[in-house]
Amino acid sequence: MMATTEECRSALKRLSDRLTRSEGGTGGVTSFDRSLSCHIKDLDVTFVGRLQDGLITVVDTLPGPPRDKAQIRLTMTGDDLVAMVDGELEFARAWASGRVRLEAGFRDLLRLKSLL
């Protein structure tokens, strides 16, 4: 069964909660303020928002791929998003295999590696 849009939105909320709780060890995420998009390929929707001070805020859910180039861009299936947030899929392994795509500036990638 494929993850729904609401399940993906809930997964992003849980990820945000986890980032906020682990703020002490996130290596400078408190000063992080970046635009964010998360394109869910199988649902063909994009969550658009911000990653600011360890908190992910989803501002909108749009049909199709991202319209604007966010500073941090994620692309994956809904099932992979839910599995990663639930701890059933390791981000590094999913990224290395191409299941998850992460695009960001080099400095942002270095800061994000401790979060994901």
Image (tube, rainbow, N blue to C red):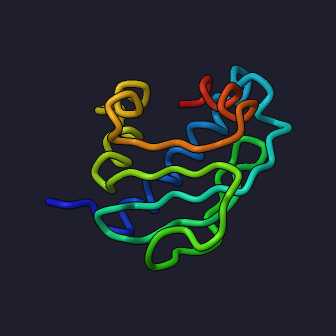
* Residue at the image point whose x is 53% and y is 54% from the top: 13
The x, y position of residue 9, in whole percent, is 46, 62
Q: How many marks?
A: 0
The x, y position of residue 62, in whole percent, is 51, 77
Q: State the image quarter where residue 49 is shown.
A: bottom right
Give the residue at the far right of this rendering. Answer: 31
- The answer to whether 95 appears left or right of 107 in the picture is left
- The answer to whether 74 appears left or right of 2 in the picture is right
Give the residue at the far bottom of this rendering. Answer: 63
The x, y position of residue 28, in whole percent, is 80, 27
The N terminus, quarter of image = bottom left
- The answer to whether 102 appears left or right of 84 in the picture is right
Q: State the image quarter where residue 23 is shown.
A: top right
Residue 21 lies, with reference to residue 50, above or below; the image says above
* Residue at the image point whose x is 45% and y is 79% from the top: 63
- The answer to whether 12 appears left or right of 112 in the picture is left
Residue 63 lies, with reference to residue 109, above or below; the image says below
* Residue at the image point whose x is 38% and y is 27% from the top: 96
* Residue at the image point whose x is 68% and y is 25% from the top: 110
